[in-house]
Image (cartoon, rainbow, N blue to C red):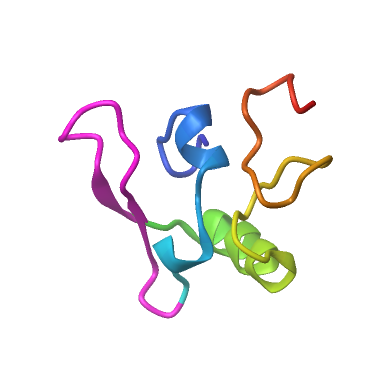
Amino acid sequence: MLEAGMRPEEVYRIRRENVSVAENRLFNPYGKTKAARRVIALTAAARGVLARRIVEAKDYLFPCESDSTRPVPKAKQCP
């Protein structure tokens, strides 16, 4: 979140198709406003985390532990 300047809900909803490690960018289609829907340049630290998550992810990079077809709904909640 800190490396990309994204809200928690935006990070939780990152999907594989939104990340391009080779192009060093992340597309955020889920912002609260049109300005929040943006392409984000990745720092080396963010790129490393996302590259590791992509290898394990089926769809969402940060899935709910009880249902991997859904993203984490909130920071401290995942039924």
Q: Where is residue 74 shown, x and y percent of the image?
A: 63, 23
Q: Residue at x 69, y 66 (%)?
A: 52
Residue at the image position 61 percent from the left and 68 percent from the top: 51
Image position, residue 20 (x, y; %): 42, 71
77 to the left or right of 2 = right
Residue 42: image x %, image y %? Answer: 42, 58
For the residue pair 16 and 25, the one nearer the viewer reads as 16
Which one is nearer the viewer's eye here, 5 or 66?
66
Quarter containing the C terminus: top right
Task: Left or right? Give the position of 26 relative to 58.
Answer: left
- Residue 23 occupies quadrant: bottom left
The magenta span reads 22-40
60 vs 2, nearest the viewer: 60
Q: Is residue 27 magenta?
A: yes
Question: Residue 58 appears in which quarter of the rendering?
Answer: bottom right
- Magenta stretch prevailing secondary structure: loop
Residue 26's place in the image compared with 72, above or below, is below
Q: Quadrant of residue 36?
A: top left
